[in-house]
Image (tube, grey):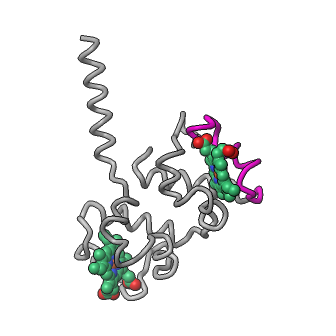
Amino acid sequence: MRFFLAFAAAAALCSAAHAATDLHNYWDSRCRECHGESAAFARSTLSVEAGRLLGRHHRDDLATFLRQHYLSDDLVAPVLQMLQAQATTSPVFKDKCAGCHGSASQFARESLVMRDGVLTGRASGRPVREYLQRHGKLAPEQVGPMVATLERVLGEVGGR
Ligand code: HEC
Ligand code: HEC
């Protein structure tokens, strides 16, 4: 019985992990060939006005357009949300971290995990907020936004 319960729990975990789509992988396999890197595309092509994401061409009908544009219906909302966050986040990771760590999505997949609600480095076992006090050369006021960005990216790759 105990074995069965452990097995059922493991199966439930697997299916939960499977259900969470890695939006960055999805972008890289379905959108990148035409649009390049997602955050650079969002920053250069999209804007946010009054909390709404607007395209350069598709200003008022972006969600409708995306429903007919290479995107399965259930992913329109999460992809729009990701692009909106990217369009409004300055590229600090790219400028100050990517040279050593690669893309934020790759870094999140490999090195980050949520532990008791706290974003934590896998290798160090330390909270990222604390780690960045002495690593990465961020100004003190950049640490909070960086932690928030990495938490978001970890969610986007299905890791939380
Ligand atoms: C085969 C090339 C191609 C692929 C693949 C592709 N797109 Fe596009 N996309 C375009 C072109 C061309 C336009 C401009 C068309 C237009 O404005 O009507 C566009 C426009 C857009 C726009 C609106 C930009 C604006 O300024 O209004 C968004 C957002 C977008 N694509 C997202 C995506 C996403 C998300 C994916 C992947 C799921 C994707 N695209 C896949 C070619 C592509
Ligand atoms: C010069 C290269 C370099 C730069 C720039 C850099 N890192 Fe690192 N980072 C590393 C190395 C190497 C490690 C592995 C531990 C060590 O040796 O310090 C690491 C470890 C980490 C860890 C801990 C990972 C774990 O598994 O515990 C975090 C979090 C982190 N870096 C975030 C960042 C962020 C965010 C930035 C940008 C603000 C950044 N790093 C900039 C090289 C760099």
What x and y, as percent, mark residue 59? 39, 85
Q: Residue at x 35, y 78 (%)?
A: 34
Q: Is residue 97 left or right of residue 158?
A: right
Q: Is residue 101 visible?
A: yes
> How many numbered marks, from 0 up?
0
Q: Quadrant of the rendered structure where residue 56 is?
A: bottom left
| Residue with the most extreme bottom position | 57
What x and y, as percent, mark residue 8? 25, 25
What x and y, as percent, mark residue 32? 37, 72
Q: Is residue 61 visible?
A: no
Q: Residue at x 46, y 79 (%)?
A: 46
Question: In this picture, is 58 found above or below 52?
Answer: below
Which quadrant does the N terminus fall into?
A: top left
The reply to whether the magenta stretch includes residue 131 is: yes
| Residue extent of the magenta highlight | 121-140
| Residue with the most extreme front position | 100
Question: Which of the pair 131/118 is nearer the observer?
Answer: 131
Q: Is residue 101 left or right of residue 72?
A: right
Q: Quadrant of the rendered structure where residue 25 is?
A: bottom left
Question: Which of the pair 74/111 is nearer the observer?
Answer: 111
Q: Residue at x 36, y 65 (%)?
A: 27
Q: Main secondary structure of the magenta part?
A: loop
Q: Is residue 136 left or right of residue 77?
A: right
